[in-house]
Amino acid sequence: MWKKKDNERKEQENGLENEDPMNKKDDFTDAASGEVPPAEQAGDEMPGTAGSEAAGTTGSEAAGAETLDNEIAPEPPVEEKLRQEIEALNDKHLRLFAEFDNFKRRSVKERVELIGTASKGVILALLPVMDDFDRAQKSMETATDVQAIKEGIDLIIAKFRSILSQQGVKEMEAIGMPFDPDLHEAVTNVPAPSEDMKGKVVDQLEKGYYLNDKVIRFAKVLVGA
């Protein structure tokens, strides 16, 4: 009998030692005051508050992202920009090539026309001299005064030389000048009439001419030896 009571007492003491004294205190406090523990209150209030705050944050972020998309347009990729630049350069090159080709064709056409009509001004200036020669030839058929014909021919020659001078043509002086292969074409050597005429032009068979101070025909001369 005493042994049974001792065993029950020991089991009760062991049970009290195994229980958590903090849990007992909390249970006692809750039961005495009737208040809900703070953890439970927080658990009841947090779900609704957290949901509203998360929704508000998500909405503001979406609005901000939409505003940025509207304000900042996406830039084209680098390959697209390079392709556009290449197309622009090719177009510019083709335009320049077409303009140069047109310029070259116009230049060739103008050069051909210029060559064909280069002597037009000189011919128009010489036509009056040709008219004078026609009239002189017609007058010689019935003329009896040789001196009048001679004077008429002299006037025509003077007019002809004046026209040539207006066109930039000038006669070359050769007789009595030292022989110059850049100006004269020696036909033959002849005995010099004097010592000072040796190596100089004694006579000329054809006159030489300049055109704007450039030799257009060499004088054919006889050189004294």
Image (tube, grey):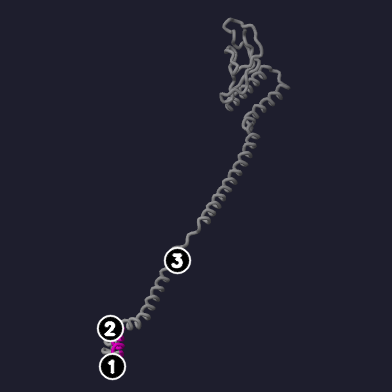
Q: Which residue is mark 2?
A: 21
Real-space Cα separation, disc 2 to disc 3, in angstroms = 62 Å
Extent of the magenta region: 7-19
Check if mark 3's residue and mark 1's residue have beta carbons within 8 Å.
no
Can you give x and y, in whole percent of width and height, for residue 221 in the image? 63, 14
Q: Which residue is mark 1?
A: 2
Can you give x and y, in whole percent of width and height, for residue 97 in the image? 59, 45
Residue 80, compared with residue 50, is above or below; it is above
Q: How many marks?
A: 3
Alpha-carbon neighbours of circle 1 within 10 Å: few (<14), some, or many (≥20)?
few
Q: Which of these two is toward me, 168 or 38?
A: 38
- In terms of secondary structure, where does tag 3 sit? helix
**Residue flagged by tag 2: what amino acid is it?**
Pro
Real-space Cα separation, disc 2 to disc 1, in angstroms = 30 Å
What secondary structure is the stretch in magenta mostly built from?
A: helix
Q: Which of these two is toward me, 200 or 96?
A: 96
Q: In the rendered structure, does residue 34 fall within the stretch colored magenta? A: no
Q: Work out which residue is located at the far right of the displayed protein and give it.
A: 141
Can you give x and y, in whole percent of width and height, for residue 135 in the image? 68, 26
The numbered mark, 2 or 3, whose residue comes first in the sequence reads 2
Tell me where residue 11 sits by quadrant.
Answer: bottom left
- Residue 141, numbered label: none
Residue 89, compared with residue 10, is above or below; it is above
The numbered mark, 2 or 1, whose residue comes first in the sequence reads 1
Tell me where residue 199 sits by quadrant.
Answer: top right
- Residue 69, numbered label: 3
Residue at 67% x, 19% y is 149
The numbered mark, 3 or 1, whose residue comes first in the sequence reads 1
Q: Which of these two is toward me, 196 or 59?
A: 59
Tell me where residue 155 sits by quadrant.
Answer: top right
**Residue flagged by tag 1: what amino acid is it?**
Trp
Residue at 58% x, 11% y is 176
